[in-house]
Structures are given as C-alpha cells and as structure tokens.
Amino acid sequence: GRQALPFYAYAHPMKPSSSSSVRKGPTRVVAHLDLDCFYVQVEQRRAPELKGKPTCVVQYNNWKGGAMIAVSYEARAYGITRAMRGEEAKKRCPDVNLIQVPTANGKSDMQLYRDAGAEVIRAIEDHVDRIERASIDESYVDVTSQAHDRLGKVKDNSELLQGLEDSFIVGSDHVPAGNRERQLEAEKDKREAEKRGIRTDPEPLKSEGAATDNSKEKVQNLQDFLHGEEDRLLAAGALVVKELRDRVLAETQFTVSAGIGHNKMMAKLVSGMHKPRAQTLIHQRAIPNFFQELPIRKIKGLGKKFGDHVCDTLKIDSMGELSAINLSLLRAKFGSERGTWLSRISRGIDDAEVKGRCLAKSIGCSKTFFNRPLKSLQDGHKWVESLCNEVSSRVEQDLRDNNRLPQRLIVSASFQKSKKTPPTKGPSNMSLVDKWNAKLDRRRSKSCPFRKGLLRVKQDAKATLTKVLNEVSDHNGSFPPILALGLAAGNITSLGSRGSRTLDKFFAKRPATKRTLPPPHHHPPHHHHEQQHQQEKASTATSDREMQAQSSSSSSSSSSS
C-alpha cells in the first residue's frame, strides 16, 4: 500500500540548495499548489448538498458560534471573514452552514483533513520531479523535467499558447476562458448582496494578503509573451500544471489554484492572486513592476522580526524600494550572507530547491485555552496526557507506514500576560492570531529523550511540563495561567532493518482513540474555546497558523484557500 504522508517539509528561506544536480534560475519551472478553501471542500465532499452554498468550518466550541477556520467563497460574498465568529456570520447570512470539526481526546481532530491532503499528494507525486508539502493544503512541485519533455514534443507555439490561454499572466489583462464566467457570477453576487445592504469584500475572489498585480507594462497578446526559451519553458510548465490540477480534481474532487514561476518564492507570491480554480504565471521581465509596491513583509523570511528590522533600518516598505539599494550597503547593514540574500530576492532570485520530501520531521499537536486558561499543575498534567494519546497514536501509525521513530519529546507552554503587563489593544476586526498574541506573554519549551510506550510517553511529558512550569513560577510556586499546551515527537529517524520487529516491542497496548465525526450540518456543542494546531515546521515552536487549525493556512495557507 501507499505510505501515509504526514504534514510538513520545511526549507530554510536563506540557504540555497548546495545540490549541483538541481537547476537554478530561469531554467527551472516551479509551481505552488494551493487547495481552494480546503476545509470547506473536504466537508462539501462529505455532504455534496453543501456545494454552492455559504459554508464555514468552525472549531467545536460554542462560544459566540465558534471560531472560523475556513470560509467558503459563497460566504465571503456576504462579507463573512475568518476574523468573525459563528454568531456574526449568521447575522451576515442567516442561511450560512456552520460545520464543526471532528473531535477526539477532548479536542479538535484534524485527521480527516490530513488524510484528504495526503490524497492530493498521492494523485500527483508520480507526475512531478519533486514535491514538497508546505502545509496541510499547500505544496511546491518542481516540473522542470516535465516542461522540458513537453517543450521537446511541440512543433510550434500553438500548443504552448494553450498553456498561456489557461493561465492568468502577471503583466497581462488576459483572463482565461474558464474564469470569465466565474468573474461575472462573482460580480453579480456582489451587486445582489449590496442591494440587501450587506457590505462585501471589494475583491472577494482575491485571497487575503495575496500579492496584487501593479505591473504597468501590459502584454498586448499571448504571442508577445513568448520572447525566448525561458518563456517557452514556462508556457510548457503551465500546460503541465493545468494537467496536475485536472488530475487532482478527477481523483479527489478538490479544486486547486496554482502559481507558476522560475522559483518557489515567485510561485508562492502569485498563486493566490486569482483564486479559486485558477493558475497564475509570472515571468522574469514582470518582476520589477510586480515588486514595485509589494510589501516586504509578504516575502518568506521577512514577515516577522527580521522584516521589521530591514524596514526600520532602511526606512523602506516595498520590494521595489529594496531592489534599488546597493549590494554593498545591504552587506554593511545586515552582514555578507543576509545582505546578499536580500539583494537577490529583491530581484526575484531564489535558489531554494523544492525538497523531495513529504514526511515530517516531527509529529505534534496542541490544545489552546483561550477563554479558560489552566491554573493548576493537575490540570496541566491532565491535558498533556490527552495530547500524549494523539501523538502516540500518530507515531505508531508513522512507524507502521514509514518505519520511523522519534528521538525527542518536546513539551511547550504559552502563558497569559501578567496583570503588570497590560494586554495589547487592537482594532475590533483583529484576526484570531492577533487577539491571541495580544494576550500572550511568553512561550517556554523543554525536551527529553523519546521513550517507547504510551505510559512512558505520558510519564515523561508530565515530568517535562513540570520543569517548564518551575521555570516560570514565583517563590510561592505560582505560575502564570496557561493559554496553550503543545506536545511534539521530534527528530524522527528511520529505523532501517530494525523496523522488522513487531510493534508490540515499541508500544504498550492501549484502547482505541474515540473519534467523533460530526454530521455535516451539526452545529458546535457547548464547550469553551479551544483549538488545535500541528507542530511540524519546528519541533520547539508553536505554529500560529495551526493555532487557527490551519492555515492558515498557513496550512496554512493560508486562510486564503
């Protein structure tokens, strides 16, 4: 049988590949595949009667109708966003369907969505050079060889023009034939909603936070695009990516949007420009105008502290401004390695290869206590034991499927701000993550060797959590309220020939996990607000995107799916 495919493969944004066998620069064709509103699509496949109707997927608590983790495009036409809760969504659209996530171990269970994401990988893995799973609903694929093969078979540009016909092109007014009807329908829905007095998103089809096309030089027709072999290679790649998207739809019923470029960075930046059910292509000549007003913080590796540092140091905000700064100045300000990296990405150059890996380096989960923080060691131990049930079950499954075991067990905790540190205030429409960060004071984590067997995992997890809490406790032994707990089995390595041993030698017998899969139209029961995320990007860090059950979406995602 096929292997189960866990969650993340992570590539460092500042370290280009050292592999000499990997093509670099404009000789590559890379695509970023992003499933459209993935959680909703999974639920719509379970209940086909939901298709075409306003639908939101919410966490299983009932506080103000539940927290949104996905909003369908039909619901977005009513002005519903992920920053809202179920009650507000109902006010915007009384007919909206609120679908709760499944539950297990007293928390959200995302296995349904992980399995659906793995279906997508299986549908395309044999048809690309390499595939790197970036989140539960996003992947990078290298289709360079497939594009070269296609290019070698075409007799003239007519077939390549079909690849362009099926794509949006940055710097062009061209709209693919299959998308014109969708745009007209969206504009009609928007007008009808505004007649009812409902304020809608001015660009409901453009994913939140997506890059925008500010290009001034427009491609007059598709033939003008094909200047040389690099452009012809991209056009051939567009044909390949369209076939991948069609294959995913045929085998899984899921629609996918895609960005196509010469590297991962550019493919990711344009994949969300024309969602849903569309692909967008960017060529090298379009990058200067595209970057002119693109915020620096949209670039991977520049979204947090380092991005703020760059903007503050140079007094700039856009990639266009960054591209105008001399390399020597960048090196002087940020060091040789970082300065060179900044100079290259400001020109759209990214040598990071698509990792040929779909297996995670860690398996983790978490539990948040946004409205009812934990205040006792007993409660902390209770919930970390619950996390152990899920992590151990998934580790055992990974052992069966992939012949691997983790080496480290990591426990993390996030704490509420003390009374001496006032919560950060923000606008009323703050996202869930922004509200979370406003309450958050600090995160701590500790690890220990991973020992086989559920009972040992629970013993070690509780002992490690106790050490974490001791670090933040005062002289009376009191610690700040716990807003979140995370558990991860990290540094997973292959067992090689050792994997032939029976599983009984690795795991103690335990009762099967009881999972509750709600019916499609089930509304959230009465529970306090709690969320789950996957700790897959790094064993010791808590993923904000996954705290939203994404994804964004981060997977994300992003939430723009």
Image (cartoon, rainbow, N blue to C red):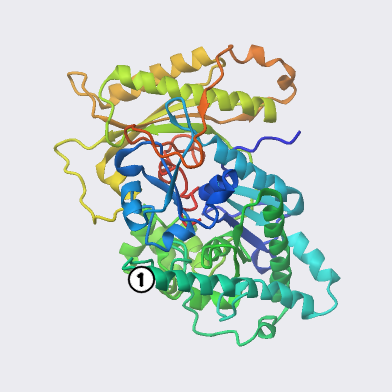
Q: Secondary structure at mark 1?
A: helix
Q: Is residue 390 above or below residue 458?
A: below
Side of 457 where 26 appears, left or right: right
Residue 252 x, y percent position in the rendering: 67, 48
Q: Is residue 409 visible?
A: yes
Classify the position of the N terminus by image quarter.
top right
Q: Quadrant of residue 446?
A: top left
Q: Quadrant of residue 153?
A: bottom right
Residue at 39% x, 62% y is: 78
Residue at 35% x, 53% y is: 89
Out of 408 and 368, give the one closest to the viewer.
Answer: 368
Residue at 65% x, 12% y is: 505
Side of 480 where 528 appears, left or right: right
Residue 536 x, y percent position in the rendering: 51, 39
Out of 411 and 236, give the one closest to the viewer.
Answer: 236
Residue 261 x, y percent position in the rendering: 62, 66
Rate crowding at label 1 as few (under 14), some (14 to 19) or many (20 or more) other CA atoms within 10 Å: some
Q: Read off the residue under disc 1.
A: 194
Residue 106 x, y percent position in the rendering: 42, 26
